[in-house]
Image (tube, rainbow, N blue to C red):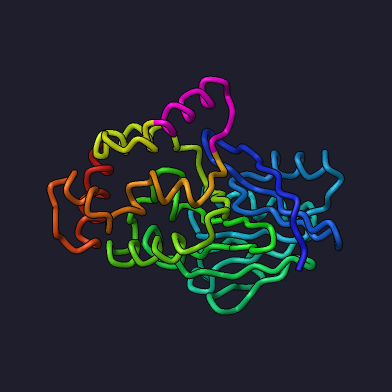
Amino acid sequence: MAKLRIQQVPCLKDNYAYLLHCTQTGATAALDPSEAEPVLEAAAAQGWRISHVLNTHHHWDHVGGNGGIKSATGARVVGPEPDRERIPEIDETVAEGRPFRLGHAEAEIFFIPGHTRGHMAFWFPESRALFCGDTLFTLGCGRLFEGTPQQMWASLLKLRALPDDAQVHCGHEYTESNARFALAIDPDNAALKRRAEQVKAARAEGRPTVPAGMAEERATNPFLRADDPRLAAAVGMAGAPPVQVFAEIRRRKDNF
């Protein structure tokens, strides 16, 4: 396997697309491009030619650039098998248990429904890079547009099991607002308070807070801690099943 060079590309108001470049073969993927132009410009600045477009799910702000990039480069568009009919310009699909190769870099595919019914994540273990779209956010998780709390909790547990040094590359710069909510329900978490200050300082300086390490997410992201008795007690649900605690945390975030 091979390590990737990864470049984050800001798009729209708060979206992140990513360029993934295999240095051994030159294969380059644009992951979740909401718009084509900034992604094409970023690739050109590096001297990379985009060979693939990878989509985690079908929402317009993750696939809006598919057509423009494909037209400009001839790239193959790759997306989740369950969303084949909803991914613009799709050429091939991915599914859990069927690895995807970008040049010499191999990704494990995780099926992580909840935000949408067909959401997938790409995990490149050699690069310690997780691309999880809108399922897991830094200090947050996606809304349940098409799935159930049971599905989303199971999806988050799948991602939470990755190594401590896994880097969470998510689809949006939401960390500062997520931190405000997390502190509102978990005010005694010392690690969370430290992180919230770091996030606030980074955003004040215009620096991204994505990616973030999985160890830090496990310690501070309330949506990954629904099975922590301390957090359950903090939201008045001591002894409740974790999925019920998760559903309550998500309900509160939806109304925050």
For residue 248, above or below residue 10: below
The picture places residue 159, in percent across and down from the top left corner, at 46, 61
Would residue 67 appear left or right of 191 to someone viewing this image? Answer: right
Q: With 213 as the anchor, is 50 left or right in this view?
A: right
Q: Quadrant of residue 24?
A: bottom right
Q: Main secondary structure of the magenta part?
A: helix
Residue at x-position 54% and y-position 36%:
209
Q: Nearer the viewer, residue 93 or 228?
A: 228
Q: Work out whether 85 lies above or below 187.
A: below
Q: Residue reaching furthest front?
A: 190
Q: Position of residue 105 (x, y in %)?
A: 74, 65
Residue 247 vs residue 245, the one in the foreground: 245
Using residue 95 as the reference point, say whether residue 73 is left or right of it.
Answer: right
Q: Is residue 112 above or below residue 96?
A: above
- Spot the residue most to the top: 204
Residue at image location 38% in from the left, 33% down from the top = 177
Query: Which quarter shows the N terminus?
Result: bottom right
Q: Residue at x 60, y 78 (%)?
A: 98
Can you tell which quarter of the image residue 2 is in? Answer: bottom right
Q: Quadrant of residue 254?
A: top left
Number of numbered discs overlaid on the protein picture: 0
Q: Which residues are magenta?
A: 194-209
Magenta span includes 202: yes
